[in-house]
């Protein structure tokens, strides 16, 4: 045994030195190496670039870290031997600022370990222009790096890939600024998307693609057309070499669809499209790429009253429409949906001639009249002044309510404005045209109180003719409040003391019902003087007062 020990080179093995060893076994995860010591050393397989290149019996240089570990086996490393051998070579070849090629070995806190012959550190902030979120994607990859710093004492090297990329981009940017000119079409990659546009990487510098230069049509946000990382063709619109800025256009790479829009979509032609936007006044329909037409809410139906476009359409609907007008310079097209169907108003003159007797239900009441539905989508309007020959109507609700069925006469038809004027009173004869056959001054009449005002009381006589009893004509005594003497619905007897055909009113006197002819003449004169002096309000004024 002593002879064998004497023959071994164990004593010549020095820790920290590079020694020659022989590969005696290659396992799946490790390599066994005989270094001539008491036992063999084991090297982890990850230290070798490729196990397939190793052969049993071949010799390799290894670094002896310790002669024995706890189990008595030597601790050796192929990788550290390579690094020790390469360190001086690296120092000769690599200087601060030089370029070195290396392979990313592993991830550590704050960055990556890169093998450039020796292990070097690549900080995460120096991996790329934008610090990556996932460092694992770089492991096993080979890149060029810039040597930023070399520490001889600590034997470490700091690398930067970012600075190298920036220098390369700066060089490319200078070259690109010399080459590009407005009108050129170049490929680029969408780098970043904002609300106002997108920044496009032109492989050397970034250019701005504004949202207004993305489409000939209208878009709300750049993300509707572009995705980050997408490769697109863009046109150079403007180059500012001093500020190193480039403006780009996407829509300019295709022809302007508005140039021959009137030929492609003639007036009155039928088109197909998709609803892309709804606004309070209508709907925008995309009828071609970059071309939208507006269907105004008034052009959606001949008969239906559409308050909101969303009552009829929703975004994404496929629809057909008719081209109504084109404003080429303003890039506007007016479309219509109702023009796809016959206009029912074209038959209104035939179906509802002037003078015709019609019947319908009250659909709506306004302050100035009532709308009568004659058929679905066709209304006629009875103005408040055409409801009664004899009564002063302040509001249609005094005579009508929604849902009432009424008869009326067609007074006028305006197809262009889609209006039909109706009259209720025209179905009857105007009693004022022959009022003398109904009432004469001096007649004693009876009727019921229909309305009380502060100035007098209205009495409904026969044939729905109203007469007015002024407050001074109620009793011989002074009346402060009419309501203290009369009530609505009371039956009264009065004498006709005035008939005014022009004003269409009849003056009555309750107190004069039993007067003699002389007394009646005197009262009539008094009544006339009240009118001339302004004490007696006209019929319309009193009615207006009664509605307050």
Image (spheres, rainbow, N blue to C red):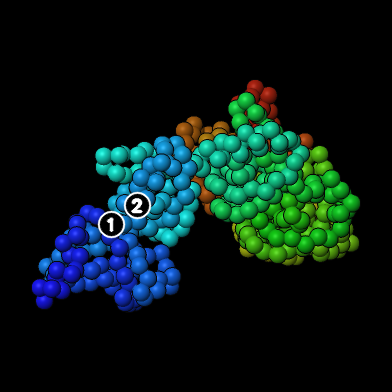
Is residue 378 shown to the viewer in this render? no
Tell me if residue 249 comes above or below residue 352 in the rendering.
above
Residue that numbered label 1 is attached to? 18
Q: Quadrant of the N terminus?
A: bottom left
Residue that numbered label 2 is attached to? 85
Q: What is the crowding at mark 2: few (fewer than 14 residues within 10 Å), some, or many (at least 20)?
A: some
- In the current view of this chain or complex, which residue is farthest to the top? 533
- Which image quadrant for residue 76? bottom left
Say which of 367 and 287 sits in front: 287
Residue at 15 percent of width and 65 percent of height:
68
x and y percentages locating residue 45 in the rendered image = 33, 69
x and y percentages locating residue 378 in the rendered image = 76, 60
Left or right of 458, for residue 270: right
Residue at 73 percent of width and 44 percent of height:
185
Tag count in the figure?
A: 2
Left or right of 506, for residue 488: left
Say which of 97 and 193 sits in front: 97
Tell me if residue 229 comes above or below residue 78 in the rendering.
above
Q: What is the crowding at mark 1: few (fewer than 14 residues within 10 Å), some, or many (at least 20)?
A: many
Is residue 164 shown to the viewer in this render? yes
Residue at 63 percent of width and 44 percent of height:
202
Say which of 434 and 309 sits in front: 309
Tag 2–tag 1 contact (CB < 8 Å): yes
Tell me if residue 386 comes above or below residue 316 in the rendering.
above
Residue at 81 percent of width and 63 percent of height:
340
Left or right of 290, for residue 41: left
Element at badge 2?
helix
Element at badge 1?
strand
């Amino acid at each position: 045994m002593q002879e064998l020990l004497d023959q071994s080179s164990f004593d010549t093995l020095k820790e920290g030195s590079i020694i020659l060893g022989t590969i005696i076994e290659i396992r799946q995860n490790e390599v066994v190496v005989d270094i001539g010591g008491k036992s063999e050393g084991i090297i982890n397989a990850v230290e070798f670039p490729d196990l397939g290149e190793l052969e049993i019996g071949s010799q390799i240089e290894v670094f002896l870290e310790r002669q024995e570990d706890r189990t008595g086996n030597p601790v050796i490393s192929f990788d550290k031997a390579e690094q020790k051998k390469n360190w001086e070579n690296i120092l000769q070849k690599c200087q601060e600022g030089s370029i070195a090629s290396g392979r990313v070995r592993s991830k550590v806190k704050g960055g990556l370990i890169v093998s450039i012959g020796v292990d070097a550190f690549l900080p995460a902030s120096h991996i790329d222009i934008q610090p990556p979120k996932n460092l694992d994607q770089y492991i096993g990859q080979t890149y060029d790096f810039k040597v930023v710093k070399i520490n001889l004492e600590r034997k470490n090297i700091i690398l930067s890939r970012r600075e190298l990329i920036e220098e390369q981009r700066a060089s490319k940017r200078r070259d690109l600024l010399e080459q590009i000119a407005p009108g050129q079409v170049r490929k680029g990659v969408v780098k970043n998307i904002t609300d106002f546009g997108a920044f496009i990487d032109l492989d050397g510098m970034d250019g701005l693609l504004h949202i207004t230069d993305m489409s000939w049509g209208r878009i709300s946000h750049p993300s509707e057309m572009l995705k980050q990382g997408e490769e697109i063709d863009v046109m150079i619109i403007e180059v500012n070499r001093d500020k190193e800025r480039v403006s780009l256009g996407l829509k300019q790479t295709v022809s302007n669809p508005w140039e021959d829009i009137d030929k492609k979509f003639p007036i009155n032609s039928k088109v197909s499209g998709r609803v892309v936007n709804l606004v309070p006044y209508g709907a925008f329909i995309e009828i071609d790429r970059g071309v939208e037409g507006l269907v105004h809410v008034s052009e959606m139906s001949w008969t239906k009253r559409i308050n909101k476009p969303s009552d009829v359409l929703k975004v994404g609907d496929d629809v057909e429409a008719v081209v109504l007008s084109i404003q080429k310079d303003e890039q506007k097209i007016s479309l219509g949906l109702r023009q796809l169907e016959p206009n029912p108003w074209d038959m209104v003159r035939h179906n509802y001639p002037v003078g015709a007797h019609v019947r319908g239900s009250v659909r709506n009441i306004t302050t100035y009249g009532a709308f009568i539905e004659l058929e679905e989508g066709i209304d006629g309007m009875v103005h408040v002044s055409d409801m009664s020959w004899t009564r002063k109507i302040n509001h249609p609700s005094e005579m009508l309510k929604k849902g009432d069925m009424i008869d009326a006469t067609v007074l006028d038809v305006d197809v262009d404005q889609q209006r039909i004027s109706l009259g209720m009173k025209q179905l009857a004869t105007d009693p004022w045209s022959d009022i003398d056959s109904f009432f004469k001054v001096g007649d004693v009449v009876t009727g019921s109180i229909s309305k009380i005002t502060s100035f007098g009381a209205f009495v409904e006589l026969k044939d729905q003719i109203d007469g007015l009893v002024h407050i001074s004509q109620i009793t011989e005594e002074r009346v402060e409040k009419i309501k203290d003497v009369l009530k609505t619905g009371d039956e009264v007897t009065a004498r006709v003391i005035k008939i005014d055909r022009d004003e269409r009113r009849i003056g009555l006197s309750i107190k004069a019902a039993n007067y003699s002819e002389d007394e009646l003449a005197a009262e009539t004169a008094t009544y006339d003087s009240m009118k001339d002096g302004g004490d007696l309000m006209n019929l319309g004024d009193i009615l207006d007062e009664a509605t307050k």
